């Protein structure tokens, strides 16, 4: 018999966060660690006998090893077929598409998103359900519960599958299809966007640069932007996925994509610059001379989506995570469609998309997407932008300025305090919670607190309630400060402070962002005692 049952013992730390289980590689390399978690996933599911499982990852260090384990364990647990990307590669949105297109039972996506990769860096395992989206809390809670009691796992005792050979393999009675990781995704993009219009734009001398950050979007961007749309060869930078992302953080923000930012601010800058993250679900959009904040990008994409064939019928609604700025709310209001405010994490959009309540979703953390898959999608955002630019024939800068002029500008910034002592961070949040009742009506200089609460979400589709999703302090006039702790960090705690100020007056739309927010930043520290409690004089990252 080729199926082995291996005795194991629980690990205590396998609680999946908003994006699955994230740990350092050496943690995953402990005996039975990855096996336990994968078996706990399978033990928490029902009815997958003979069904299809999709497996793929962002190519980071340890990807191939865990893919082999997952394939052998899927066979031993009774799946009928595995679809795996060639080389073990599938971007997160591409994996979501493969799951949906093939009506798979679910998928295992291996990634730690924008976190660094390498022998001592980050790795992650996430389970996606049949709609192509991240597993809801009900399932991740069941997985966590199972990791605490697990005593054995099943694995097929067979040779490794050749992941580099596209085609059909058989192992232990299960079929393994090694598929082209790019083809299905590129086809989906061709259905949504006007490739002809974008090709014409590019042929007319419109210059673009896309930084794949040595991560998973390289092969996707090369194929779509250069081969299919005709962008100049060399438009896609760092297109080879590397196990350690070339030693960089594959996080498309102003800190880690600094070189792209500088290219786009130069006199001879290309017309359009963009980047994506480790697993291809985030995006950074920079026009010549202007960085578009993710919150603004969501609002702009929603306001202009009808210009792309896939959204010509208009949008059903817009969803944004709570800390994302209110810019999209004003667009929804003008379009007369629903606006849904959800907790941080893409999984909360799934129900809204499945129920047809929302068409476009976004998070301030550079995640934007739509109902075409159930993950955020970096290249999708890039292509929608290009489609809009091809139709409007105006610069990014002009489009953004016009948007602010008609809707007002939401100045926005996020201050992160990384690797803060966990106790200090929890203390800071507890202290904020204790103050909530006393804040409304309080004045801080020219700012008066209107409301203060700990955000709770009532899912309109399944009526589930998620509490303690972040402290919101709303000031009169639409300014806001939000505090929450990251759920994706792998060491210590990360405090995120989100600061936003609404400015309706177009004459005041050219102020430097940190300057425009200075009084709110000071008030945030006054209320939360950030400096005193964390011992940090300034944030580690400002975006
Ligand atoms: C971060 C982002 C969040 C995003 C998640 C996964 O989570 O803030 O918007 O959904 O990464 O990409 P956090 O670390 O804040 O919990
Ligand atoms: Zn990501």
Image (cartoon, rainbow, N blue to C red):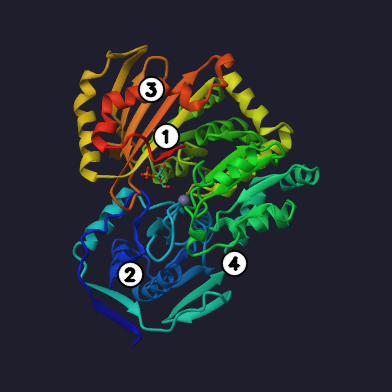
In the rendered structure, the answer to whether residue 309 lies left or right of residue 68 reads: right
Which residue is situated farthest in the right direction here? Answer: 204
Say if residue 324 shows up in the picture: no
Which residue in the structure is indicated by mark 4? 180
In the rendered structure, the answer to whether residue 361 lies left or right of residue 260 reads: left
Which residue appears at 58% of the width and 14% of the height?
507
Q: CA distance from mark 1 to mark 3?
A: 12 Å
Which residue in the structure is indicated by mark 2? 29
Q: CA distance from mark 4 to mark 3?
A: 49 Å
Q: Depth check: give the residue in front, 292 or 181.
A: 292
Helix, strand or loop at label 3? It is helix
Residue 520 position by quadrant: top left
Which residue in the structure is indicated by mark 1? 414
Whether disc 3's CB lies below 8 Å from ligand 1 is answered: no
**Which of the two marks, 4 or 2, is nearer to us in this view?**
2
Q: Give above or below for 284 relative to 452.
A: below
Position of the N terminus by quadrant: bottom left
Helix, strand or loop at label 1? It is strand
Which residue in the structure is indicated by mark 3? 520
| Dot placed on the residue nearer the N-terminal end, 1 or 3 | 1
Q: Which mark is residue 197?
A: none
């Amino acid at each position: 018999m080729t199926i082995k049952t291996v005795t194991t013992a629980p690990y205590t730390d396998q609680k999946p966060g908003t994006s699955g289980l994230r740990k350092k590689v050496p943690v995953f390399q402990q005996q039975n660690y990855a096996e336990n978690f994968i078996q706990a996933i399978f033990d928490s599911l029902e009815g997958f006998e003979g069904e299809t499982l999709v497996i793929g990852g962002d190519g980071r260090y340890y990807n191939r090893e865990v893919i082999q384990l997952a394939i052998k364990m899927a066979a031993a647990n009774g799946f009928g077929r595995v679809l795996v990307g060639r080389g073990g590669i599938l971007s997160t949105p591409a994996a979501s598409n493969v799951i949906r297109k093939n009506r798979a039972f679910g998928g295992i996506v291996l990634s730690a998103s924008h976190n660094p990769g390498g022998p001592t860096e980050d790795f992650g395992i996430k389970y996606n359900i049949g709609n192509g989206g991240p597993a809801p809390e009900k399932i991740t809670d069941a997985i966590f519960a199972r990791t605490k009691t697990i005593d054995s796992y099943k694995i097929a005792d067979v040779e490794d599958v050749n992941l580099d050979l596209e085609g059909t393999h058989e192992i232990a009675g299960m079929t393994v299809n090694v598929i082209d990781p790019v083809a299905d995704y590129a086809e989906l993009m061709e259905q949504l966007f006007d490739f002809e219009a974008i090709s014409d734009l590019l042929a007319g001398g419109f210059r673009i640069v896309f930084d794949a950050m040595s991560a998973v979007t390289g092969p996707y961007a090369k194929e779509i932007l250069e081969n299919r749309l005709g962008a100049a060869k060399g438009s896609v930078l760092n297109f080879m996925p590397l196990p350690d992302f070339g030693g960089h953080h594959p996080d498309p923000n102003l800190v880690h994509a600094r070189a792209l930012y500088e290219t786009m601010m130069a006199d001879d800058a290309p017309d359009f610059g963009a980047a994506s993250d480790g697993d291809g679900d985030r995006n950074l959009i920079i026009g010549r001379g202007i960085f578009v904040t993710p919150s603004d990008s969501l609002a702009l994409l929603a306001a202009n989506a009808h210009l792309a064939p896939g959204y010509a019928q208009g949008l059903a609604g817009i969803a944004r995570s709570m800390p994302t700025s209110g810019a999209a709310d004003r667009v929804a209001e003008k379009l007369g469609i629903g606006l849904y405010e959800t907790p941080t994490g893409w999984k909360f959009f799934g129900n809204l998309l499945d129920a047809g309540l929302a068409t476009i979703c976004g998070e301030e953390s550079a995640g934007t997407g739509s109902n075409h898959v159930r993950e955020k999608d970096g290249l999708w955002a890039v292509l929608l932008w290009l489609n809009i630019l091809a139709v409007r024939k105006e610069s990014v800068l002009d489009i953004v300025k016009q948007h602010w002029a008609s809707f007002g500008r939401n100045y926005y910034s996020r201050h992160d305090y990384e690797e803060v002592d966990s106790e200090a961070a929890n203390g800071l949040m507890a202290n904020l919670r204790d103050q909530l009742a006393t804040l409304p009506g309080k004045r801080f200089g020219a700012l008066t607190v209107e409301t203060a609460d700990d955000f709770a979400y009532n899912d309109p589709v399944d009526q589930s309630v998620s509490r303690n999703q972040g402290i919101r302090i709303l000031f009169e006039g639409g300014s806001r400060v939000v505090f929450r702790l990251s759920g994706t960090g792998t060491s210590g705690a990360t405090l995120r402070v989100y600061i936003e100020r609404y400015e309706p007056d177009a004459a005041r739309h050219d102020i430097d962002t940190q300057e425009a927010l200075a009084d709110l930043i000071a008030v945030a520290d006054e209320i939360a005692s950030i400096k005193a409690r964390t011992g940090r004089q300034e944030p580690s990252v400002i975006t």
